[in-house]
Amino acid sequence: MITSDRLARLGSGVFDRNDRRKSAYASSERQNHQPLIDLSLGSTDLSPPVAAVEAMAEVLQHPSSASYCLHAGTQPFRNAAAAWCQQRFGIQVDAETEVLLLVGSQEGTAHLPLAILDPGDSALILDPSYPSHRGGLELADAHIHTLPLTAERDWAPDFDVLSSDQWQQLRLMVLGFPHNPTACTGEQAWLDEAMDLSVQHDLVLAHDNPYVDLALEGDAPSLLRCPQWRERGIEFFSLSKGWCLGGFRLAFAVGAAPLIHALRQLKGVVDFNQCQALQKGAIVALDQHADWPSRLLPVYRQRRDRMRQALTALGWDVPEPSMALYLWMPVPGWAADRGWSDEQLAAELLEHCGVALTPGSGFGDSGSGWLRLALVRPVEDLENAVTRLHPWWDRHH
Ligand SMILES: Cc1ncc(COP(=O)(O)O)c(C=O)c1O
């Protein structure tokens, strides 16, 4: 089959191998086979607002939901998104020119580079980072620079590692705090500094913010709090995490009018918008259940705390994450001493304990030596996963 170099560069590597191992495990018919406990995806078991799903179901019957939805048809959704911005950040956003409906923030971050970069243009992403950040740049044939995040700096970006010349070459920087996979909420000061650098060096600042309401400590940063976002910023919000609507693929971008226009023009080639029924559900979620994410926080806090206790009892020291949904776990010393990579450790845990985690190297080189555990099952299942680890751990430790 003839495929592009671009596709080869995209790769799928670690994630693909992990997925294949998971399906092999799930379909295995060995004796004493334990059902898979899958903690490898940030896809929550918690429920979306009932009223949002009911609204979708109702509008689904309407013929308008079966029609293609052009940009004008997304106006009620864009109004709701703008109203949410007003309520959440106290800023007035123009629903016509500064808001765009997306099929998930993954789609938006993946398409943005195609809309604003030419082949060979330079862009900066965090390492580790969500795969669509790198993937979008690969699709656009961009030259990719990475900003490594380290445990020593508590995952704070060090913008000084780039020289002034390197900054000058960049046309786009993609950040995302609260940060997947390190589970670090981040600080507004980091975004403010990034925005200053973007202004100084004339580049676009994109901020992927699907976890904005899911900080467990403090308040999450937002690009919309940086005064210059209207000049060169674009921020991606999602209903996947805070409203538990991941499968419905609902998100939006808020940003400088020229960037929104560019992304809209690009998307015009690729897709139509989500149907009216899905948009209606999203409107109900944003309008009537803006507090939904905050109601999830006690659940995630309890899961985080109970899971850390259970892992500590096992002998696995896991740093306390400041955002919901994930634990970011170092490969334990004894496993590293055996030469196990994060990917090998994940394979072992799956094979011998039936517990699926995500190898950190799938998010970039700086994720090597770490595993991500998603807190997307009830506490009992999470603790059960650790119980399964005990005999295996004791054998190897
Ligand atoms: C940083 C980040 N961006 C984007 C996404 C995807 O979000 P959406 O469902 O809105 O595409 C995720 C999902 O895990 C994520 O962690």
Image: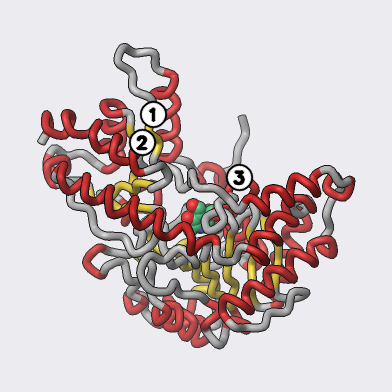
Q: Which quarter of the rendered picture does the C terminus lie within? A: top left
Q: Could you say which quadrant of the image residue 289 lies in?
A: bottom right
Secondary structure category for the residue under label 1: loop
**At which x and y percent is residue 379?**
35, 43
Q: Could you say which quadrant of the image residue 15 lies in?
A: top left
Does the residue at mark 2 contact the one at mark 1 (Cβ under 8 Å)?
yes
Secondary structure category for the residue under label 2: strand
Does the residue at mark 1 contact the one at mark 3 (Cβ under 8 Å)?
no
Whether disc 2's CB lies below 8 Å from ligand 1 is answered no
Labels 2 and 1: the sequence-earlier one: 1
| Residue drawn at x 26%, y 26% as measured from the top left | 352
In this rendering, the answer to whether 374 lies above or below 170 is above
In this rendering, the answer to whether 75 lies above or below 349 is below
Under mark 2, the amino acid is: Ala
**At which x and y percent is residue 196?**
47, 86
Viewer-side label of 2, 1: 1
Q: Which quarter of the rendered picture does the N terminus lie within? A: top right
**At which x and y percent is residue 60?**
79, 45
Q: Which residue is mark 2?
A: 356
**At which x and y percent is residue 287?**
67, 66
Labels 3 and 2: the sequence-earlier one: 3
Circle 3 packing at 10 Å, graded few (<14), some (14-19), many (20+), is few
